[in-house]
Every structure is written in C-alpha cells, then in structure tokens.
Amino acid sequence: MKVCKFGGSSVADAKQVTKIIDIVLADADRRIVVVSAPGKRDKTDTKVTDLLIQCAEEALAGKCTEDTLARIIGRYAEIQRDLNLPESVVAEIEQDLRDRLAGDTSHHGMFLDGMKAAGEDNAAKIVAQAFQTRGANAVYVSPREAGMLLTDDFGNAQLLDESYPQLANALKGRKGLVIFPGFFGYTKGGAVATFPRGGSDITGSILAAAVKADVYENFTDVDSVYPVDPRLVPEVKRGITEMTYREMRELSYAGFGVFHDEAVIPAVKAAIPINVRNTNRPSEPGTMIVQTRKAESGGVVGIASDDGFCNIFVDKYMMNREVGFGRKLLQILEEEGVSYEHMPSGIDNISVVIRDRNFSEACEARVRDRILNDLKPDNVLIERGYALVMVVGEGLYYTVGMAAKATAALSAANVNIEMMNQGSSEISMMFGVKSCDRTKAVNALYGAFFG
Ligand code: ASP
C-alpha cells in the first residue's frame, strides 16, 4: 500500500486536482491520499493558508473579514466550477468558514488553528468529491474520526503516540480511497491543533507509519530533491536519486524547503521509504529517502543554507576552568524561551547561534544584561545578519580532508568563515558566514563538491 501526499501547488486549481486524480488512479496501491490547502497558482498568488491566517487575525482585531473570506471562498469556487462539481460544495465550505469565524476567540492560538485547518479540511472534501465524479470509490476521512491526537501546542503541535493504533484501525483494510486532510489533528480536549507550517508532510508520514505503507510518496512541484537550491545555483541540473533519512533531516532543517524536517521522523521509526516526486511530471522517479545507502567516499549529498541568524559571542579568560559556564549561558536562553541552533566553542570563548526571528530587540537586551551580570564575561557581542551553510553527506564520515576542501573553496571565493562546526553525527559541516556572502559561499561549495 502507498500513502501519497500532495502539496499546496498540487491542489492550487482544477487542472492540478485532475493531475492528482490521474496519478492516484494509475496505481491501485495508492490508497491513502493526503492533501494540503490550495497553494499559489503563480508567483504572485497567495496561499489559502496565508489568507486564512489573515482572516483570523482580522477577526481577532475586530476588523471586517468579508473581503478576505470572499477571496478564500473564491479559491474553492474556482475549483468547483472548473471541475463541474455541485454548487452546494461551495455553500458548505462557506458555512464551515463562517462557523469557524464565529467560534470562541478567547484563546488566540486555538482560534487561529481552527481557521488554519479549514484550508486542508475543505481541500480534502472537495478533492474527495472530484474523485467521486470520476467514478472512484473515495471518501473524505476526518482526522477526528481517525483518531489523530495531537499535543495542545497550537501552531506547533506534535503527535501523541497513542494515535498510531487508532489511525491503523481507522484506515487499514478499508475498501476504496481515503482522502485525508493534512496539517492538523485534535487535542484530547477536542480542539483543532495544527503542526508547524508545511506540516501536511508530517501528516502523510504519520499515516504511512500507522498503516505500515510500502512507501510514502510525497508529491510536490519539482522532479526531485536537488543537491542545492536552484535559486542560488541555477546551473544545478541533476537531482538526488537516493539519500538517507539522516541526510534529508539535516538538509531540510538547514533550509531545504522541499520536505518538512519533522516529517522524516515517523517514517524513520517505521522504516518506510519516502519518495519525493513531481505532480507535474509523474513519470520521473524522484528522490528515494531510505535508511541506508552506499555512501561513496567523499560523497556530499547536498548543500543547504538559510539566512536570518544571530550570533551571541561570549569571551572570558579561563572559561575552560569554569564548570557550568555553558549550562548557565543556555539557561538564560531557555528562560527566555529561545532555542539555539549551534554552539561552537573555543578555550576562552563560546558562540551560540540562534534564529533572528526568535530573538526580539527587547529579548536581546535582557539576555545581554543577564550574561553580563550572571556570567561576568570579558566581552559579549551580539551580531545579526548571519547565514548558515550546511554541507551534508554520509560520506563525510569516511573521508579525510573534507573540511579542508570546503575551507579552501570558501577562501578562493573570498568568503570569510565566521564560524565552523562539525555535527556530532559527522555527516554535516556547518559554516557561518555573513548574509551578504551566502550565495557566494554556496556556489563555491557546490563547485568544490559537485563541479
Ligand atoms: N497549508 C499549510 C501551510 O501552508 C500546511 C502545508 O501546506 O503543508 O503551511
């Protein structure tokens, strides 16, 4: 059995929905279909999820929501019209959205999640109808009915493990196709909760693990996972044919947008291979993500990069003798609710790399004061405007001289390395550079490892 997930661009309009139906009906093993909310139809378009967030925020601010609501309904109405589905479909969607908007706004996160989930929920309902009009035996299954239980971290929820047997019971052995909305589930208290953004990938992976699928097919709008972001290195042509779960997780966490980093975990635990494929070119084999692969010596699988990092640099003579220095520094961040990404250190200094967006100016001032007061350093420097570049590959573990190759390439491109860190798994190397050097750095590393 195969579980297939289709991303927002695959549900963006009627033409794309037709492709989903063709793909699924072409293979009798494709039995569970997870869908995202309609995404962008072109570069200037807005995703339905973003419109839903806008609509919820307008409601919370006491503003009129009618214009935004009309835009959301319009997206579904276009699909209904172009697929010749009954008009009642749109009336039901409108009612659903109005019911959600009229819900309790006292808990903002809960209200927001209820609205956000409407994107996937209504997409699954309309896609199920579209399958039925093609004569397929397809039913919409709600995450509530299937027992998809999540923690109550609204907007950032995680699966409760007790969901697995419930999901297996609800989905295994069914006749016909299941059309399941991605991105959300329910808390034990019965409220809607969503995964982080892009979380329909997580739903697909969970369902694949629950039913012990032979493969989890993740359909998106690229032929495969590319070793580097084609927007930064346009000459990249060849995609990755096979990579390991660890490589995918490292790369997606470090900026590869094609697959959600948290979606790797359920598939790993159940040892389900993941196949990233293109809805627009279903004949392409895509990228297989598997437990192990034969890593050729020196094999770098990909280079990821992301912008928007901040570096907290703390310097103190004889830091090496001060037991608990690192813990106290991290505790300050923990008490501010800031999580860190990397922590390269030297004898007398330590850097903590965090994401800019989790670190407001006010928070920065409090952290600086506490470091100065509690840790009595010689120097604290907090600098924004960093990019991180990650070189990832199982082959790094086996090969001598990989860091030298990377640093030589960066130096030849005149990129100053601000920080360096090798992941303990030894399948990744991190380089911190100034944001303005990001593209140059990625191109230089691509040239060194793939040129
Ligand atoms: N629709 C949600 C988002 O835009 C989830 C997803 O597409 O996976 O984040």
Image: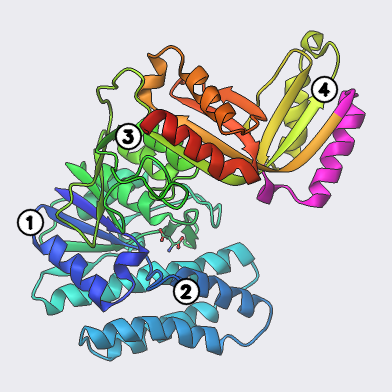
Expressed as whole percent of the image width and height from the top left, the position of residue 422 reads 54, 22
Circle 3 sits on which residue? 268
Q: CA distance from mark 1 to mark 3?
A: 25 Å
Asked if residue 301 is positioned above or below residue 345 in the image, the reply reads below
Is residue 340 something one can see in this rendering?
Answer: no
Magenta highlight: main SS: helix
Q: Which residue is at a point 51% across and 70% down the rendered structure image? A: 50
Closer to the chain start, of discs 3 and 4, is 3
Q: CA distance from mark 1 to mark 2?
A: 36 Å
Q: Which residues are magenta?
A: 355-379
Badge nearest the viewer, 3 or 4: 4
Kind of residue sitting beneath label 1: Ala
The image quadrant where one finds ligand 1 is: bottom left
Expressed as whole percent of the image width and height from the top left, the position of residue 25 reads 10, 63
Q: Give yes or no for residue 444 being in the magenta stretch.
A: no
Kind of residue sitting beneath label 2: Thr
Could you say which quadrant of the image residue 329 lies in?
top right
> Counting other residues with Cα less than 10 Å from the Cα at mark 3, is it few (<14), some (14-19), or many (20 or more)?
some
Q: Which mark is residue 169?
A: none
Circle 4 sits on which residue? 315
Circle 2 sits on which residue? 44
Closer to the chain start, of discs 1 and 2, is 1
Asked if residue 158 is positioned above or below residue 352 in the image, the reply reads below
Q: Which residue is at a point 50% across and 84% down the rendered structure image? A: 69
Closer to the chain start, of discs 4 and 1, is 1
Q: Give yes or no for residue 358 being in the magenta stretch.
A: yes
Circle 1 sits on which residue? 28
Badge nearest the viewer, 1 or 2: 2
> Tag 3, which secondary structure?
helix
> Tag 2, which secondary structure?
loop
Q: Nearer the viewer, residue 274 or 236?
A: 236
